[in-house]
Image (cartoon, rainbow, N blue to C red):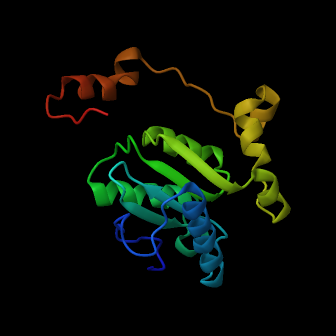
């Protein structure tokens, strides 16, 4: 495994490759432990594509100075690159810990069919990875969103929708 969190796809029928959710979760946990030993975060993830190919991902937030380089996102990126598509319909994500809201959203955007996780958000919080404020941001009310206010600024309609106008008029666009 390279230190940037990328890996070549592994055929599911290769010797020693997992075949059950528990096996894939055990491998994700093993990746997380190995990643800590290599100065990465304590998270590992695996995407198993609809055709059975396996793509691994590691948490490289501090190593890459990239707050979006969570193990789940890295595994999804690797799967998309390896499969040549942004649509992972039929794929399953196995992760060493309950996905944060960003990773859940990425899974939804990638059209992942199902997610399995080992440790939960409370286990992560006990180790110093407390994402409660992020969950509250989406689940709570306006007071919970005060940590990062989001507001729409008024622009003329033509200017505001210009990117979408350009998009809908572009016959060469790739729908998603």
Determine whether 107 is above or below 71 in the image.
above
Q: Quadrant of the N terminus?
A: bottom left
Q: Is residue 102 above or below residue 46?
A: above
Q: Is residue 81 left or right of residue 131?
A: left
Task: Say which residue appears at 34% left-offset and 42% top-offset.
Answer: 87
Residue 29, position as x, y percentages in the image: 63, 68
Residue 68 seen from this side: no
Q: How many marks?
A: 0
- In which quarter of the view is residue 10 placed? bottom left
> Residue at horizontal 42%, vertical 70%?
6
Judged left or right of residue 122, residue 172 is left
The one nearer the camera, 91 or 150, is 91
- Percent position of residue 50, x then y: 36, 48
User: Residue at (41%, 62%) from the top-left corner?
Assistant: 54
Left or right: residue 134 compared with residue 35? right
Identify which residue is drawn at 50% across, 45% down: 106
Q: Position of residue 101 (x, y in %)?
A: 63, 43
In the image, is residue 50 above or below residue 150? below
Residue 137 appears anywhere in the view: yes
Res. 169 image quadrant? top left
- Residue 136, quarter of picture: top right
Q: Residue furthest right?
A: 126
Residue 76 x, y percent position in the rendering: 44, 54
State the residue in front, 33 or 20: 20
For the C terminus, the quadrant is top left
Does 69 appear above or below 139?
A: below
Q: Residue furthest top?
A: 157
Furthest residue toward left = 171
């Amino acid at each position: 495994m390279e230190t940037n969190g990328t890996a070549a796809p592994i055929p599911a029928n290769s010797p020693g490759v997992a075949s059950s959710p528990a096996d894939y979760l055990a491998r994700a946990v093993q990746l997380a432990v190995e990643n800590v030993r290599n100065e990465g975060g304590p998270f590992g993830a695996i995407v198993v594509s609809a055709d059975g190919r396996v793509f691994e991902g590691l948490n490289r937030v501090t190593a890459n100075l990239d707050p979006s380089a969570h193990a789940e996102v890295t595994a999804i990126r690797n799967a998309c690159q390896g499969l040549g598509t942004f649509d992972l319909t039929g794929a399953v994500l196995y992760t060493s810990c309950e996905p944060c809201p960003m990773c859940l959203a990425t899974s939804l955007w990638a059209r992942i069919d199902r997610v399995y996780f080992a440790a939960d958000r409370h286990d992560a919080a006990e180790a110093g990875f407390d994402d409660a404020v992020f969950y509250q941001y989406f689940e709570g009310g306006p007071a919970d969103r005060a940590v990062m206010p989001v507001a729409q600024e008024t622009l003329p309609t033509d200017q505001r929708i210009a990117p979408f106008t350009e998009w809908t008029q572009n016959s060469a666009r790739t729908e998603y």
